[in-house]
Image (cartoon, rainbow, N blue to C red):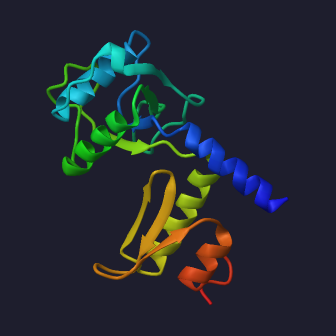
Amino acid sequence: MRPLKSELNVRDQELLANDVEITGISETKEENPHHIVIAVATKLGLTLEDRDIVSVKRVGTTRGYIEGELRPRPRPLVLRLVRRSQRDDLLRAARVRRHLSTVDMGLPGDTTRFYLNERLTYSNRQLFFKTREASARLKWKFSWTRDGKIFVRREHGAASHRIRNEADLQKILGINEVGAKE
């Protein structure tokens, strides 16, 4: 049963190969998601046209309030592009400009930092969360995703390890349970 779930997860992740998730941009009732995405691409120094966009929409249920804030957290924008190379260009540009904010973008709402990430399946998102949590606790310096795959590296120059499931997480990071150190 486990191999079948794993195979389905891999196929589901392949379906998200052209998707980008944009988090942190304020949500308003009158917003135009296409305009927001084009403004984000411009901020990154890229040109994105309407014909490059398959779809863009907010996903998920309305979120709860951030501690100390008067507004709920905005839902992420999910952008599906025509070509994967466009997605890769967007993610590469976002990595170069890590400290992005909505300043000078002409968007309504407060100036906030926003982030672009590849979209992950629910299973991969949960596994990546556990991986980041465990690697931070155990002082591993790097955890990242690339093409829907999860990786960790103990320190700069060390070998990278792919995390496929919780068993890999336990084996590679040396923990009995994902929540505890040996």
Q: Where is residue 124 in the image (x, y as percent from the top left)?
A: 59, 53
The image quadrant of residue 37 is top left
The quarter of the image holding the N terminus is bottom right
Above or below residue 163? Residue 18 is above
Q: Where is residue 5 in the image (x, y as percent from the top left)?
A: 76, 53
- Judge by depth and name the residue closer to the eye, 75 or 90: 90
Q: In this view, does 152 lie to the left or right of 34?
A: right
Q: Is residue 114 left or right of residue 176?
A: left
The quarter of the image holding the C terminus is bottom right
Above or below residue 179? Residue 48 is above
Q: Is residue 50 left or right of residue 78?
A: left
Q: Where is residue 32 in the image (x, y as percent from the top left)?
A: 37, 13
The image quadrant of residue 170 is bottom right
Above or below residue 48? Residue 148 is below
Residue positioned most to the right: 1
Q: Which residue is drawn at 40% across and 9% down?
A: 30
Q: Position of residue 84 (x, y in %)?
A: 40, 36
- Judge by depth and name the residue closer to the eye, 25 or 19: 19
Q: Which residue is drawn at 45% across and 71% down?
A: 152
Q: Is residue 164 visible?
A: yes
Q: Can residue 113 be seen in this view?
A: no
Above or below residue 121? Residue 55 is above
The image quadrant of residue 41 is top left
Q: Residue at x 15, y 33 (%)?
A: 45
Question: How many discs appear?
Answer: 0
Q: Residue at x 63, y 50 (%)?
A: 10
Residue positioned most to the top: 30
Residue positioned most to the bottom: 182
